[in-house]
Image: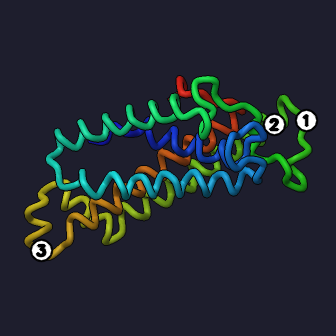
Amino acid sequence: INFSVAAFFGLGAYGTALMSSSDAPVLGNFPPILGLFFGLALAGILAVLIGIPTLNLREDYLAIASLGLAEVVRLVVTNEGQWTGGAVGLSGIPRFFEGWPLLGNLSRGVPTAAANLLLVSTFVVVTYLFLRRVHRSPWGRVQRTIRADEDLAKALGKDTYRFKMESFVLGSMVMALAGVFFAHLQLYLSPGVM
């Protein structure tokens, strides 16, 4: 059980906002596509750093540790105003298509909403197809074996720690992807949304 969904969602959202927002205290004014990669990289790095000490824990302790991570990330975002805007939040986040040749000039309202819907739908479908393919791959079969009986997977010679780490990082990056699109759809972030 992973209760750190809010933490990785927030890292994705704040990662892209800090890269692309015009009001960001650090970085800022980069294209939103770079913010997307920065948010995903931030979530992946934190997932590895958190996964190293926690993935050997039993399920109930892992759940408690992941719940603690979500609270720590929320408190850091709230209290480190010089990096994240603090409790005031971040505004000036551009639309995802801003600066693109054709889609960047869409007027606000229905055209922008349709473009955002198409963008999010495309990423949902691509992510679903990718995860479905991963689920059916040999890697996915090992993951299902670990979930069903970790001792059996170890007896078959599988490095269960590595497989669990890969799964944790992949899941955190999917959560961060949702945060990235949330930030570019809302155009404003505060710690209360995490």
The numbered mark, 1 or 2, whose residue comes first in the sequence reads: 1
Question: What residue do we see at 36% from left, 64% from top?
Answer: 136
- Give the image location of residue 130, x and y in percent: 49, 60
**Contact (CB < 8 A) between labels 1 and 2?**
yes
Q: Quadrant of the N terminus?
A: top left
To which residue does mark 2 refer? 112
The numbered mark, 1 or 3, whose residue comes first in the sequence reads: 1
Which is more toward the observer, 104 or 128? 104
Question: What residue do we see at 55% from left, 48% from top?
Answer: 177
To which residue does mark 1 refer? 107
Q: CA distance from mark 1 to mark 2?
A: 6 Å
To which residue does mark 3 refer? 156
**Contact (CB < 8 A) between labels 1 and 3?**
no
Q: Could you say which disc has been placed on residue 40 in the image?
A: none
**Residue farthest along the bottom direction in this orientation:** 157
Residue type pointed to by label 2: Thr
Q: CA distance from mark 2 to mark 3?
A: 52 Å
Residue 152 relative to residue 163: left or right: left
Q: Residues within 10 Å of mark 1 (few under 14, many from 20)?
A: few
Which is more toward the observer, 139 or 17? 17
Residue type pointed to by label 3: Leu
Q: Is residue 185 visible?
A: yes
Residue 94 relative to residue 102: left or right: left
Residue type pointed to by label 1: Ser
- What secondary structure is marked by label 1? loop
- Give the image location of residue 105, x and y in percent: 91, 44
The numbered mark, 2 or 3, whose residue comes first in the sequence reads: 2
